[in-house]
Image (cartoon, rainbow, N blue to C red):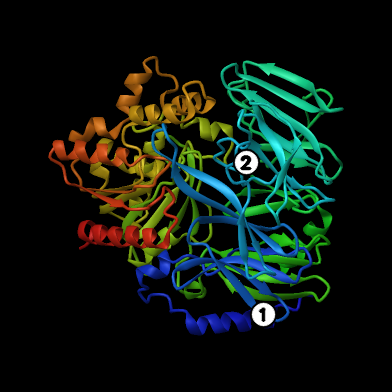
Amino acid sequence: MLRFVFGVFACFALFAGLSPARGQVLPVETFAADPAMAHVVLSPDGRRLAYTSHVNGAPVVVVKEISSGAIIAADTRNFRTHGLRWADNRHVLVTASDVTAIWGARGDYDFSTLVALDADDEMDSRQLLRRSNRLGLNLDVSRIIGIEAESGHLLIPARDDNRESNLLAVDPVTGNSVTAARGARDTRDWVVNARGEPVARLDYNNDRDRQILRIPSGSGWSTISRETGVERPRYSFAGLLPDGRLAVTTLMIPSDPAQDSRRALYSLSLETGELDDVVFQHARFDIEDVLIDPYSNLVVGVSWIEDFERVHWFDERLAAHQVVIDGAMPDWRPQIVSWTPDFTRLVVRADNPATPPVYFLYDVAQRSMDIIGASHPDLTVNALQARQHITYQVSDGATLEAYLTRPDGDGPFPTVILPHGGPESRDKGGFDYFAHFLTSRGYAVVQPNFRGSSGYGYRWMEAGYGQWGTGVMQHDLTDTVERLVTAGIADPDRVCIVGASYGGYAALAGAAFTPDTYRCAVAIAGVSDTQEMLNYTRQRYGRSHWFIRSWMQRIAQGEDNVRAALRAASPTRHADSITIPVLLIHGRDDTVVPIEQSQFMRRAISRAGGDVELITIDDGDHWLTASSTRQLVLTELETFLATHLGE
């Protein structure tokens, strides 16, 4: 039995003394704040923890000695941090990015790189793989394929000055690199074994729709399979399985319309290049992620999302530890997120529908579970409403899943429908700062996984193709509101549609095509003109890139006149139908949806005589990464909703 219960409840009792009781109105900055703890990883020897935090509003990476509690931190305000990893027992690798313009190219671009921090030398920092005469233009040199077992060098794909993609072996101490394996201009992916030796590479040519699988042969490469007429890469390398087989993920497109398929993990033959066995496929849901052991480079598990994220471990030790941890935390959703090479110490992240993540250190030998810290200590206990997983039927008989967060008391409530971005994405259970903030202000919040969402198999996603604006994707949102009204949860006269990215598009489409359903609309970094967005995307990726074809398929599938379909789906072209107030919010550093999309929408509504406001955010990106950006967005949203949904 774990030495767990008394220690954990004592910690939560401490948090309870610090946290507000539910019903107390919390300030905006509490919800907008950066996590006090995130990206927690164990050093290989199990003696140190590294995690991201913030001090006086400045982001930092912290290294903590577990035995003494001593900490040292590095200021990371000059870049955005997306993840951490230990290179060895001394050096922490930070996945970092920044927004930069490219001469001669339209718009700004996100550049991702690695920064090494030396925990034994006052967190001295060194950026790995800087631009040089032999290193070409790379938007991302942060992806670690594996680590060479003998040297400890990091294996990172990068393009040289001839635009060929090679596998570089990078010293995390000096930053020096050598070429470990040579690829080609078409090389898209690599996989290495536990020793860090290349096992296979995948080449894909956009112009020729050609995919080639190659394996090492002497000093060169042998071709295992060559396929033409492939409109996009057929699969992605996941890594090697413990038995040595190559694992890939793919979402098969069924030839029979009556059949469905889900993204699954397969083994791939390195003799024929064909898919062999299904390693893991869920009966209902797509694989969300493949979990890799950072020490052996082997696939050790897969995750998927039901009402929350779940994991299947292939490694028997991790599977056994998960069973013990689950049994000790029945009201939580614990997930193992980091471990030592011998799996004797593990970091566990746990949350539930009303509580942000809390981190624990599980010591297998001591059979103890000690708290490390909480991501949002001001929101840890009894401060939030639970996000409920609900199902319901829409008008054509389809069954939708959604997450409903509602205030205390009886409805009907003023309501916000909050469609997710993507649209090939989905919402999941657990803490959601946006939904929880709105509910703290008295609004019911519903987040539907409408048709076109990912995670539910190919047919559910395909059902959204060609359905932007006036099709089933938008009908599902309208029907969701009607179901909440019928259930006595939503006040039909006080409903606002709010969304970001594709969700922002859906908010504008709701205002343009079904204005009678909503009192107001808020679009954050939303697409407003699909033709202009397609033009922008072509300039960034090239006209022949598979992503362009995929994007057109999703908006205009089944339409003979693509241009007419794009115009018909664009809210800017229907601004004269908008009769409700619209709030637009957009960051100037958005590298996904350019700020011009919101400027187009403001101009169109203004010319039509409508009520519209555009708020621009200096240094704001697409994901509202900075806490100051989130605070501004939530503050403006609170004011706007109080004005238009108030009594």
Near mark 2 (Cα within 10 A), the count class, few <14, some 14-19 or many ≥20, is many
Q: Is residue 279 visible?
A: no
Residue 457 location in percent, x, y? 59, 36
Numbered disc 2: secondary structure: loop
Q: Amino acid at mark 2?
A: Asp
Comes first in the chain, label 2 or label 1: 1
Q: Residue at x 50, y 27 (%)?
A: 550
Residue lying at 70% horizontally and 54% vertically, measured from the top left: 172
x%, y% of residue 585? Answer: 30, 50
The residue that appears at 37% across and 48% down in the rendered structure is 499
The residue singled out by tag 1 in the image is 69
Q: Position of residue 471 (x, y in %)?
A: 38, 31
User: Does residue 530 appear anywhere in the picture?
Assistant: yes
Determine which of the numbered discs, if any, sits on residue 286 in the image: 2
- Towards the viewer: 189 or 31: 189
Q: Image quadrant of residue 568? A: top left
Q: Residues within 10 Å of mark 1 (few under 14, many from 20)?
A: few
Front disc: 2 or 1: 1
Which of the two residues, 271 or 253, is positioned nearer the viewer here? 271
Q: Is residue 518 left or right of residue 84?
A: left
| Residue type at the position of mark 1 | Gly
Above or below, 403 against 627 in this view is above
Residue 241 in which image quadrant: top right
Q: Name the side, left or right, on which 498 lies relative to 463.
A: left
